[in-house]
Image (spheres, rainbow, N blue to C red):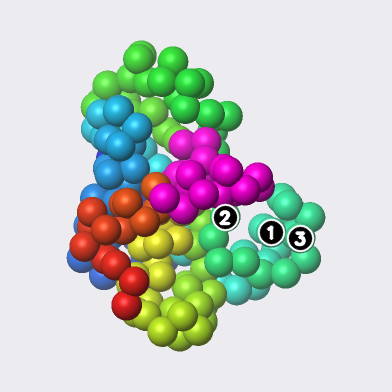
Amino acid sequence: MKLYYDEERLPVTPETLQVMGKAADGCVTREGMEETKFAVSVSFVSLEEIHQLNRDYRSVDRPTDVLSFPQYGDLDEIREEVAWCDEEAPLELGDVVICLDKAREQAAEYGHSQERELIYLFVHSVLHLLGYDHMEEEEKRSMRRREEEIMSWLGIGRE
């Protein structure tokens, strides 16, 4: 999968970006799709920026850890669209916006590394781009199972 990001606002290491790319690949291949046909935009923002985005787009007046802005409604729609794409012009699934301040805070709260939290948030967000949700209990269980599957596949278990 192709990840698009602003190199001037890139607060993570190349190694972390590589793991994020592998995580995104794992998300789409587990849905039976070819990873080279997709792209995702990734932005890293401040606490203030994510607070404003959360307020403006979700009407929730507080900062959050990650936001997803999907281009498609569900996997069926993605599968229809991707049939027309190739590696030269990958299908853009949407945007992921991550607040590193919240990732640091949550990593400390949960007792694991900042990188583990960052990768988990990214996996969570890519799954949203693929149509996963956690509003209903069954959806939540399905999404959590997929998150755990991807994290285990990456070799990043709970610490």
Going by the image, does 48 lie left or right of 10? right
Please rate how many residues cluster around mark 2, counting C-alpha atoms within 10 Å: few if below 14, some from 14 to 19, many from 20.
many
The location of residue 97, given as percent across then percent down, is 51, 57
Q: Which mark is residue 54?
A: 1
Q: CA distance from mark 1 to mark 2?
A: 8 Å
Is-magenta flag for residue 28? no
Tell me whether circle 1 and circle 2 mark residues in contact (CB < 8 Å).
yes
Pointer 2: what residue? 67
Q: Earlier in the sequence, mark 1 or mark 2?
A: 1
SS assignment at label 2: strand
Q: Quadrant of the C terminus?
A: bottom left
As helix, strand or loop, the secondary structure at mark 1 comes to helix
Determine whether label 3 and label 1 are within 8 Å by CB.
yes
Residue 67 is situated, as x and y percent measured from the top left of the image, at 57, 55
Is the residue marked by circle 3 packed among few (<14), some (14-19), or many (20+) residues within 10 Å?
few
User: In the rendered structure, which segment of residues is drawn in magenta?
Assistant: 126-145
Left or right for 73, reference 150: right
Question: Which label's residue is closer to the chain start, 3 or 1?
Answer: 1
Q: Earlier in the sequence, mark 3 or mark 2?
A: 3
